[in-house]
Image (cartoon, rainbow, N blue to C red):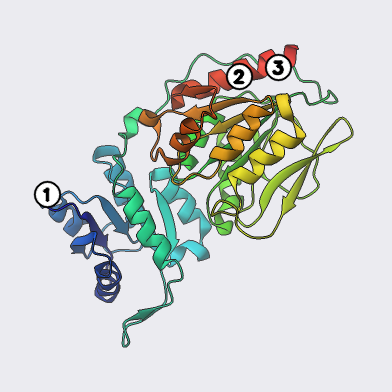
Amino acid sequence: MSSKIKILIIDDSRSVQKMMEFVFSQSSDIEVVGAAHDAYEAVEILREVKPNVILLDVRMPRMDGLTFLKKLMNQHPIPTIVFSSLITKNPEIGVRALEYGAVAVMDKPVIDFQNLKSTMLQEKELIDMVRTFGNENLPKRSELLVDRPKKLVPIAVGANEKIDTVICIGASAGGTQAMKEVLLQLPVNFPPILVVQHMPVEFTGQYAQYLNDTCAIHVKEAENNEMVTAGTVYIAPGDQHLTMVKAGNGYRIKLLGGPKVSGHIPSVDVLFDSAANQLGEKAIGLIMTGMGKDGAEGLLKMKINGAYTLAQNEASCVVFGMPKEAIALGAADRVCSLKDIPLVLHDLAKKKHRK
C-alpha cells in the first residue's frame, strides 16, 4: 500500500499539467494521480480516486475554478491550492478562493516549456504545502459554520476612554474564513484587535475591505503610526511585521520591514512579542488554524507576561499546526472550538474592562 501523497492537477493547459507533473516527480513522496482539463473531467477522476491535495486553476472552460471549489468544499472537502496567473492581477479572486475554502493561493509561474524550466520561485514552498496539507483531513464546511449565539451585549467603551485591553490574533491556512466567523459576532465597540494572517501582500488590503463590508466591527489594513482605537480590527500588511508602541494613554501601530521571522513576514511571533512587552496583562492572545509553528513561542511569552491566551482546538481547525505547537509549549490558558471563541473573547474583554 502506497503512503505517497496523491495530488490531482486541474488546469486547462496541457503544458502546465506536464510542467507540474515534472515538478512533483522530483519528490519521491508525492504522486500525481490525475490531470484534468476542467471541473467535469476532475469529477470523473474523483469518482475513481480520492487525492490528498488538489491543485486548481481558476480560468477553465465549462465551469470556472472558483465555482468548482465552492461545490467541492460544500460536498467533499479536499485540501485545495488555487494556482492561477489571475491572482496578482485581481486580488479579489484570491480572497474569494480563500473564502470558499482554498487552503492556499499561489501565482502560476512563467514556464519555459522548451527547456522544461520554471520561474516558479515558490516551487519548494508549493511542495512543502502539498506535504503539509496532504496529511490533513479537512472538517466539513458544516462543522466550520458557527452556531451564532444571541447578540453579544456591547462593552461600554467611551470614545476618549483609555484602552485597557488589546486582542492579538495570529492565523495562517484556513484562517481567512475562521477569522470572519469570529469577527462577524463581535459588537461595533469591541476592544481593538491586531491580526496577523499569513497571506500575500496583494491580498491583505482586499481582505480587510472584504471583512469590513461583511462585519459590524470596523476592519482595515494597518497603517504605520496610527493610533489603536476601540471598535477597530487592524490587519497586518502582507510585507510588514505588525507591532505596537505605547503612546500617551494608548498605543500606536508600528510597522516594521526586515527579514522573515519564524519563516514569515508578517510574523505572528513578532506581534505576540510586541504584545507581551508593551501590554503585559492588558493583552489577550489567540492563535488559530495554520501550518507551521509561527506564534507558539510568542504566545508563551504573552502568557508569561500576564496575558490571557487562547488556542483554537483541533476539531475546528483546517490545519492544526500552529495551535498544536502552542499547546505543546503550554502557551495556551484555554483551548476553544471556533464556535466558542467569540463569546470567550467577549467575556474576557468584559472582565478586563471592569477591573
Query: Residue at left 28%, top 40%?
Result: 137
Closest to the observer: 249 or 75?
Answer: 249
Query: Residue at left 52%, top 29%?
Result: 182
Residue that mark 2 sits on: 346
What is the C-alpha distance between the residues marked 3 and 2? Answer: 10 Å
Closest to the observer: 37 or 124?
Answer: 124
Q: Amino acid at mark 1?
A: Arg
Q: Would you say residue 46 is visible in this rendering? A: yes
Residue that mark 3 sits on: 352
Residue that mark 1 sits on: 47
Q: Amino acid at mark 3?
A: Lys
**Disc 2, SS:** helix
Q: Nearer the viewer, mark 3 or mark 1?
A: 3
Are discs 1 and 2 less than 8 Å apart at CB? no
Q: Compare marks 3 and 1 and give the one earlier in the sequence.
A: 1
**Disc 3, SS:** helix
